[in-house]
Amino acid sequence: MPTAFPFTAIVGQEELKLAIVCAAVDPTIGGVLVFGDRGAGKSTAVRALAALLPPIRTVEGCRYGCDPSGAELCPACRARKAAGGLKTRLSPTPVVDLPLGATQDRLVGALDLEKALTLGQKSFEPGLICRAHRGFLYIDEVNLLEDHLVDLLIDVAASGENLVEREGLSLRHPARFVLIGSGNPEEGELRPQLLDRFGLMVEVKTPSDVKSRVEAVRRREAFDRDREGFAALWRKEERRLRAKIIGARKRLAAVEAPDAAIEWAARLCMRLGADGLRGELTLIRAARAIAALEGSLSVAEKHLRQIAPAALRHRLRRNPLDESGSTRRVERAMSELPAAA
Amino acid sequence: MSETGACGGGDTWRDPLLAGALFAIDPAGLRGIVLRARSGPAREAFLSWLTRLLPEATPLRRVPIGVPDSRLLGGLDLTETLRLGRPVAERGLLAESDGGIILLAMAERLEPAAAARIAATLDTAEVSIERDGLALKAPARFGVVALDEGASDDERAPAALTDRLGFLVDLSELALRDFIELPWTAADIAAARARLGAVDIDAAMIAHLNAAAMALGVESLRALLLAAQSARAAAALGGRTQVSTADAACAAALVLAPRAQTSPAAGDPPQAPDQDDGDSDAPPDSDGESVDPSAEDLVVEAARAAVPPGMMERLQRASSGARGSGGKSGGFKRAGLRGRPADVVEGAPKDGQRLNVIETLRAAAPWRLLRGGAGAGGEGRLPIERQDFRVTRVKQRAQTVTIFAVDASGSSALNRLAEAKGAVELLLAECYVRRDEVALLAFRGESAELLLPPTRSLLRAKRSLADMPGGGATPLADGIAAAVRLAEAEKRKGRSPFIVLMTDGAANISAGGKAAGRKRAKEDALDAARLARAAGLEAALIDISPRPQPDAERLAAEMNARYLPLPFADASALARAVRRPPLARLTG
């Protein structure tokens, strides 16, 4: 894989960066959808994510990347555990790119063609969602994804388990991943069921001020001319952010959400008529991640405010006659709320 | 070594050929050219100029329209796989073009999905495939020449591609007899290519380019980056290691000017379509720390002067929605083959279904040893039996295009328009699930105008609906005729159109935009309505007058349309009235 553009070298796009870092701190937030202008750095930011993630502990020799400390183990690991314990090792957190044109067999896994052809054996070849287990699955141009693949993803993302019934193979393995999607709204709308799978939604715009535009072009140009050299310049920044994320992860469990914060979030969702409880939950979780990143142990209103548009803008019931965008509506509702006590 | 000289010559061959030369210096960096021209000697002359400047033996691959993913991206080589008895991967066209150029035939008809695949490859410089049981990555750095043969303004190469390619070259106004030779040879280009790595562009020069981009309303950061890269290539061609003002001016003219979105005269307001000859001395708006204002003026001026003539009129006419369109048609598949793959089922193909070879192979593969098809070393054939056959079932949905034809004349008043807009947006909001499209045309004054070409994008709809004009006379006949024309065009693309005509049935402008009295206008409208019936088009007429009008009812009868008197219709009632059950069905 060619060297990726460093995350910290991305000019502007603060909301996008914040949402991605939040998802890295707390995967249960439930994924990030990035919609916006062409060439604003959507996929650059996502592809830069891998470098920021701490390694995870996996079971040695497990092809499904099982978590040795977790309750969900694949059958093979359960057998290993019963037979006297699991050997573990550190591996990088997976960030898997779902390329356009991927076929279903590669997504969910299928019969290993090579083994079947050469040895006449039935053997399962895990797919991309298996590789993404405990990591991230990135779909660029998510609104161009084939319908039957969308259905599959929705199903697996909801159940956390991949069920394979193909060619006489029948097996299941844990598949928990954070979905990251990006796309341009001009290419089409996203299906509501899929939209709902994303915890946060970010709208990116091309920067309009001269300074950031010039700086963005300069950095990109420098990167294109010497990828390694450019990445080396940013290594320190990257390390710093990575340490911050690891620190926040450790702190996360200790971060509390006081009643006042929860009430503020509930009021906001009520005022907006956001569907379901999911909005509130995501909002609180994301705010906890932000608090953890800031080194604070309690969620405050400012944390909620920072992430509320991203947590709620895709959950508003669409009102075509209201010309103002959903971001504006969230902001308006926030300005009308009394402060959290 | 010859200088690049002043750019922006307008209607001569100079700019196109210079763009070709710069592209030849750095095909992978400048990404490509959208070459808008019909197939013919002018295009051939340009392409031969380009190939002369590229290094010898540069691979030049032609990518035909409608090429399947297995060829574009790569996949399982079935013949070899069967022959050798082990999976053999086949490289796709994109991977094969690594280090070369791809020629995209009929780019204006390129499917958005195919455009997205090529765009993704341009972004990552590698092809990544996860198909047919294979997971592969292959380097793919190439330049693209998109051959755009579009005739009308809304037939263009997909925006996802245009945004990424450095140059938009239009040869349609140029004649071969005016062809000129530019002084550079392949050796000059090679020297420039060698020099390119050492060429620097400073922040001030990028700021000048940015000022030019802003003056033309070009927001895309990719365009700015491509302009900076082109300026470097121009400097390399001129033998410099630092980008000069002239190089930046040249890049602004070649890269930025063809993307102009606003009139260069007025700067920022998006609708200010005054003609400008480039002699305006209004300073470009820049809040940056420009070092040398006169240099910035020079760059901005070069860009302004190079905006193609006629472009302003187009900007004036076209709503912003027209930008993203293009390349949507292409349905020529037979029944039972079209649609989206739903699932794979056992059974032999019948009724024109396609055998799913990979799945069939998969079904057969595990039994190979058992059926005695394999020799000792894994060679031999793969026995395939009838029970292995798999076919792909496709979900076929007759895609509906709902065409709103709205009376926007004075008699129908502006509030009607607001309701029509609301209804269009409501329908669009649920469109994604139903895969339907919506179009909107309004008739007023002397003619009908297509405000929103068929689209599924709510964003585009909102943009073009925002400033829908109202008032004036009622050219009902032309309005109906325009709707029928659009409906028939959609029908030819294999979609099922549905016309929703919103009017009070009163006409005062006859066919062809002539004010020939109410009686004549009414007759013409009835004629147009019969045309719709003769074409077998489905339609509904919504009577929007305060009291139901016999004229409107008669019109509906002649059109064979449902008549819906909705004097107080609001947007949601309207949307409900025209909603139809989706036409999904499984075939196979």
Image: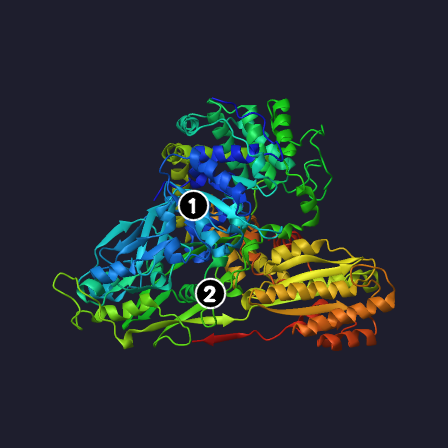
Q: Which residue lies at the image location 20% right of the left edge and 69% below the top edge?
A: B368
Please provide percent x and percent y for residue B84.
21, 59
| Left/right of residue B402 with respect to residue B565 in the rendered view | left
User: Which residue does the numbered mark 1 point to in the structure image?
Assistant: B102
In-image side of A54 versus B210 (left or right)? left
Residue at x 22% of width, y 56% of height? A61
Which image quarter is the C terminus of chain B in?
A: bottom left
The amino acid on which the numbered mark 1 sits, given as a three-letter code, is Ile
Count of labels shown? 2
Q: Identify the residue position indicated by label 2 in the image.
A: A147
For the residue labelled by badge 1, is the local secondary structure a helix, a strand or a loop?
A: strand
Above or below, A128 against B39 in this view is: below
> Which is nearer the eye, B493 or A312?
B493
Quarter of the image for residue B275 reads top right
Q: Position of residue B60 (x, y in %)?
A: 40, 43
Rounded to the nearest angstrom, the CA distance separating label 2 from label 1 is: 30 Å
